[in-house]
Amino acid sequence: MIMDGHTLGYGAVTSGRHFRNPISFSKFIMEKADHCVFCGDGALKFAEKEEFPGICDPKELITQNAINRGNVTYKDYPMYVQHHCSGTPVNETQIPETHDTVSAVAMDAEGHLACATSTGGIPGKLKGRIGDAPLIGCGGYANKEGGATTTGHGEALMKITLAREVVYNMENGQNAQESAEKAVKKLGDSIKGSGGVIAIDKNGKFGIDFNTKVMVWASIKDNTLEFGMEKNERGENISETEQL
């Protein structure tokens, strides 16, 4: 999914197995279609009709990690949810895998905000299941006050529309960090959900919080790169170039 905070433009694709870069296709939908979200075969038909250049064979998207994982069924789903939240191995013979959600929040030179999120989901989910990532307010949300994206256990994030919750806090005068912390606390307190957020407010301040074991993140502002993975971890690298 992708969302333009200045215009509230929004585009998303679910079951996007024919697209190498789902966020690029989501932007294409946002700019070209009268609808906001396309799914499965309908998404492919729209892409072909409008000559979207990023169509691919679904087999090209199968990674070696997925092949090595073997056949994962729905009975394994709760175990993988716990794995992604706690970082523990799925079983004694497996090392922890990384979650494949990627997202970004950004502010351009004119102060306009945007967000984008993409994921393959947690292994073991049933066919047809839709998670939080493509859903407005759940996987991401942006307006003129702020932008936020999320990761974690999708069913929990959807129940409190976590990304919208973060931006709602910014609308009510809190900065990005305060908004992220308040929303993640609500996620844990209200439904014992697991996840995390990154956020940016209209003043260009960055926020991050999570209640999982780790969440990889990075931010760039004024040629300074900050990054971290574990709770309260924050590294910094100042670029010598004029512009990152």
Image (spheres, grey):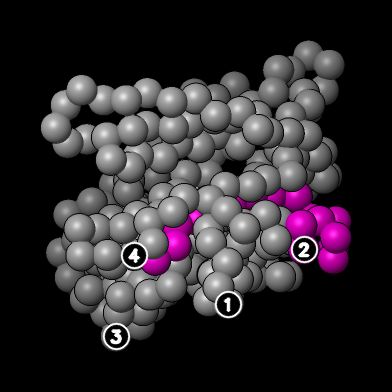
Specify the segment rendered in magenta: 185-202
Instruction: Name the kind of residue labelled 3 in the image.
Output: Asp
**Which residue: 34% across, 65% down?**
113
Q: CA distance from mark 3 to mark 1?
A: 32 Å
**Which residue: 73% across, 18% down?**
94
Which residue carries the number 1 mark? Answer: 172
Instruction: Name the kind of residue labelled 1 in the image.
Output: Asn
Q: Position of residue 122 (x, y in %)?
A: 65, 45
Closer to the camera, 71 or 239?
239
Q: Is residue 100 above or below residue 153?
A: above
Q: Position of residue 117 (x, y in %)?
A: 45, 54
Which residue carries the number 2 mark? Answer: 186
- The crowding category of the residue bearing disc 1, from other C-alpha atoms within 10 Å (few below 14, some 14 to 19, many at least 20), is few
Q: Quadrant of residue 79?
A: top right
Q: Is residue 178 left or right of residue 176?
A: right
- Of labels 3 and 1, earlier in sequence is 3
